[in-house]
C-alpha cells in the first residue's frame, strides 16, 4: 500500500466522513482512498467553494470535515475559504498535496501560506509515521478546534507504507470540557445575585443543545434576558425572553434592553465590536463577565470584571449547583419587558415605509414575504455585503443550526458554498442561500454543484447591480462610484443555464412563482433574482463602517 492510500484510510478511520475538494494529480490517490474507506467525496467546481463547503459542514454537523486539494494552485485557490475557517476556529483538516522542489511550477511555501491566515500546519514525513501523523492532525483539529493543513509531499505519498505500520488509529475522543475554578463560579453566582437587569450573550462556544438548556435554566433562576452573537443565532428560538442577536443586527428594542443591563455575561462569546456595537451596547456602569474555555480569549476585545476559564455549559451547570433550592429572582423579567419582547423584538415587527415600486422591491418586504413562504425547517447560508442583514434577521431560523454565518473574514462570495455545506449536514431541511449580486456572480460556478448534488435549494439574490456596501460607504462623500456599479445582469438566466428554475422578482406579486415552487415537487433548485431598491445603506452598515 502506498502512503497516499494509507493516509486516506487513516483519516477516514479517525472519524472524517465527508471530504470536499477538487481533484488533481497530487491528491487523486489520496481522495480515492478516502472514498474507498467510506468517506463521501463532494466535488466542488473551485477550491475556495470546496473549502467553505467543508467549513460549513463541520460547523453545522458538529463533526470534523476534510478538504482535499492539489499542490500549489489547488491550495492557493482555497486560501480565502481556509482563512475563514481558521478565523472561526472550525475543526477542519486540509489535505494538501505538496511539492518540495523550488524549481517546480507548483512550488509555494505551503506551510508559511497556511500559517499566514491562522491555520496550523503538519506534514507527513515518512511511510513509517504517515498513519500516526495523519491521525494526529485529525486529533489536533478536534481537540484544539483548529483548521489544520496537513502537507503531503508527492515523493512521500509515493512511498510504500511498511507492512508493520498501523493500518488505522481509533477516532479521537471528543474535546474534553474545561472545568471552571470553584472560586470563579462562586464569583459568577455572586454577580448574578447582585444584578437587577442581567443579560446573557451566548456565542460560538455555546452552540449545543446541552449548553442552551443550561444557560436557559440559569437565566431563569436569576431573571436574565437571553441574546446570542450572530454565529449562534437561533440558540434560544422560542424562548419568550430571547432578544435574538446582540450587536449590529439587534432590533431597536433589543439594543435598548442590552444597553440598560447592569450585568453582561458572555458565554463562549468574544464580545467583539460586532456583538457589542463597538462597545456601545454595554452600559458604562455594567459589570462584564466572560466565560471561555480558552484563556487567551478573555478580555481580548474589551475589559472584563470577571474572566472565567471554563466550558460554557459546565460553568453554567456548576453555577446552578450552587443555587439548588433557592428562589428564582425576577431580575429583568417583568411583564412590561415580556410585552416589549413579544411585540417588537423581531425586525419584521418594526414599522417601515416600503420603498419599493414597479421596478424594484424593498429588501425588507422581500425578506418578510420569503419568511412567510418558505418552510420553517430551513438552513440558511448568508453571503457578505450591504444586503446581508435582511436575510440574517428577517428570515427566522428554528435553532442554532438554522443559520450558518461564515463572516469572520468578511469575504464576499462564500455564501453559496456555505449553504451547500450546511445543506449536506442538515438534509432534512430546506437549504436557502442568500446572496448579493456581487457574491452570486463570484461564486456562480457552484450553482453547478447544487444542481449536480440534487439539492432542493432556494438561492435568493438581492440584486442591486452594485457592490452596495461600497456605494453607501463612499457615496455620501460624493466619490465617483463607477468602479462599484455595474450594468444590469440577468442572474435568473444564469441560473437557468445551470439547470435551475428561476424567477425575476420586482414586486411582491412576482413571489407567486416561489409559492408554486414550494408547493411543487422541488425537483430542481430555484433561483430568485430579486431586483432590490438601493437608495440607502442597510441599517447595520453604519456600525460596520465604524471599524474601517
Image (tube, rainbow, N blue to C red):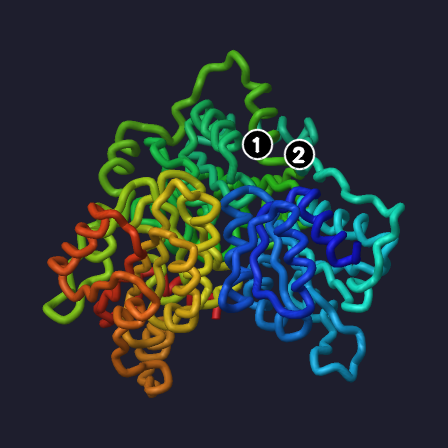
Q: What element carries label 2?
A: loop
Q: Taking the image as drawn, is residue 373 in sight?
A: no
**Residue 259 vs residue 380, the one in the foreground:** 380
User: Is residue 104 positioned above or below 512 on the image?
Assistant: below
User: Is residue 272 positioned above or below 214 on the image?
Assistant: below
* Mark identifier at residue 283: none
**Residue 26 vs residue 393, the one in the foreground:** 26
User: Is residue 225 positioned above or below 472 on the image?
Assistant: above
In this figure, what is the number of numbered marks? 2
Q: Is mark 1 on a helix, strand or loop?
A: helix
Alpha-carbon span between mark 1 and mark 2: 9 Å
Q: Which residue occupies 55% across, 63% down?
A: 81
Query: The N terminus is located in which quarter?
Result: bottom right
Q: Which residue occupies 73% across, 69% down?
A: 98
Percent coordinates x, y for residue 73 in the rendering: 63, 75
Q: Could you say which quadrant of the image residue 445 lies in?
A: bottom left
Q: Which residue occupies 44% across, 37% down?
A: 199
**Residue 486 vs residue 330, the one in the foreground:** 486
Of label 1 and label 2, which has the lower sequence position? 2
Q: Taking the image as drawn, is residue 136 in sight?
A: yes
Percent coordinates x, y for residue 60 in the rendering: 49, 45
* Mark identifier at residue 177: 2
Q: Do the residues labelled 1 and 2 touch (CB within 8 Å)?
A: yes
**Residue 345 vs residue 394, the one in the foreground:** 394
131 relative position to 12: left or right: right
Q: Could you say which quadrant of the image residue 493 lies in?
A: bottom left
Percent coordinates x, y for residue 515 in the rendering: 18, 50
132 relative position to 409: left or right: right
Percent coordinates x, y for residue 142 in the rendering: 67, 45
- The residue singled out by tag 1 in the image is 313
User: Is residue 246 positioned above or below 343 on the image?
Assistant: below
Amino acid at each position: 500500500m502506498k502512503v497516499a492510500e494509507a493516509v486516506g484510510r487513516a483519516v477516514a478511520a479517525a472519524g472524517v466522513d465527508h471530504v470536499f475538494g477538487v481533484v488533481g494529480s497530487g491528491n487523486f490517490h489520496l481522495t480515492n482512498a478516502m472514498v474507498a474507506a467510506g468517506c463521501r467525496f463532494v466535488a466542488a467546481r473551485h477550491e475556495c467553494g470546496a473549502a467553505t463547503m467543508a467549513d460549513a459542514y463541520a460547523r453545522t454537523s458538529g463533526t470534523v470535515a476534510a478538504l482535499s486539494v492539489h499542490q500549489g494552485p489547488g491550495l492557493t485557490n482555497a486560501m480565502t475559504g481556509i482563512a475563514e475557517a481558521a478565523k472561526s476556529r472550525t475543526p477542519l483538516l486540509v489535505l494538501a498535496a505538496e511539492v518540495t522542489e523550488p524549481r517546480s511550477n507548483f512550488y509555494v511555501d505551503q506551510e508559511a501560506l497556511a500559517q499566514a491566515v491562522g491555520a496550523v500546519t503538519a506534514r507527513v514525513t515518512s511511510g513509517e509515521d504517515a498513519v500516526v501523523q495523519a491521525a494526529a492532525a485529525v486529533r489536533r483539529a478536534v481537540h484544539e478546534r483548529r483548521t489544520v493543513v496537513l502537507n503531503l509531499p508527492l515523493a512521500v505519498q509515493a512511498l510504500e507504507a511498511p507492512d508493520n505500520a498501523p493500518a488505522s488509529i481509533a477516532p479521537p475522543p471528543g474535546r474534553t470540557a474545561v472545568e471552571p475554578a470553584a472560586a470563579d463560579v462562586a464569583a459568577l453566582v455572586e454577580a448574578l445575585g447582585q444584578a437587577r437587569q442581567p443579560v446573557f450573550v451566548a456565542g460560538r462556544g455555546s452552540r449545543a443543545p446541552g449548553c442552551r438548556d443550561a444557560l436557559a435554566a440559569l437565566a431563569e433562576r436569576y431573571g436574565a434576558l437571553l441574546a446570542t452573537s450572530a454565529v449562534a443565532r437561533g440558540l434560544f428560538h422560542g424562548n419568550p425572553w430571547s432578544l435574538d442577536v446582540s450587536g449590529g443586527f439587534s432590533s431597536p428594542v433589543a439594543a435598548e434592553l442590552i444597553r440598560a443591563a447592569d450585568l453582561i455575561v458572555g458565554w463562549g462569546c468574544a464580545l467583539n465590536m460586532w456583538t457589542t456595537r463597538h462597545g456601545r451596547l454595554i452600559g458604562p456602569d455594567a459589570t462584564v463577565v466572560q466565560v471561555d474555555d480558552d484563556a487567551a480569549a478573555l478580555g481580548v476585545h474589551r475589559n472584563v470584571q470577571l474572566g472565567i476559564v471554563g466550558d460554557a455549559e459546565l460553568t453554567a451547570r456548576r453555577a446552578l449547583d450552587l443555587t439548588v433550592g433557592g428562589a428564582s429572582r425576577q431580575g429583568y423579567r417583568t411583564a412590561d419587558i415580556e410585552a416589549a419582547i413579544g411585540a417588537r423584538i423581531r425586525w419584521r415587527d418594526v414599522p417601515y415605509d416600503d420603498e419599493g415600486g414597479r421596478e424594484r422591491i424593498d429588501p425588507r418586504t422581500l425578506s418578510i414575504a420569503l419568511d412567510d413562504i418558505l418552510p420553517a425547517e430551513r438552513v440558511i447560508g448568508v453571503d457578505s455585503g450591504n444586503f446581508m442583514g435582511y436575510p440574517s434577521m428577517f428570515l427566522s431560523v428554528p435553532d442554532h443550526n438554522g443559520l450558518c454565518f461564515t463572516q469572520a473574514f468578511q469575504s464576499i462570495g462564500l455564501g453559496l458554498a456555505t449553504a451547500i455545506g450546511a445543506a449536506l449536514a442538515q438534509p432534512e431541511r430546506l437549504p436557502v442561500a442568500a446572496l448579493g449580486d456581487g457574491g452570486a456572480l463570484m461564486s456562480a460556478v457552484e450553482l453547478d454543484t447544487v444542481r449536480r448534488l440534487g439539492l432542493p435549494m432556494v438561492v435568493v439574490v438581492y440584486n442591486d447591480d452594485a457592490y452596495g456596501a461600497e456605494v453607501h460607504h463612499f457615496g455620501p462623500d460624493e466619490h465617483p462610484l463607477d468602479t462599484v456599479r455595474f450594468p444590469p445582469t440577468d442572474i435568473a438566466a444564469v441560473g437557468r443555464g445551470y439547470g435551475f428554475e428561476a424567477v425575476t422578482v420586482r414586486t411582491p406579486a412576482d413571489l407567486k412563482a416561489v409559492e408554486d415552487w414550494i408547493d411543487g415537487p422541488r425537483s430542481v433548485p430555484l433561483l430568485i433574482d430579486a431586483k432590490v431598491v438601493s437608495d440607502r445603506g442597510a441599517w447595520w452598515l453604519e456600525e460596520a463602517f465604524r471599524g474601517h
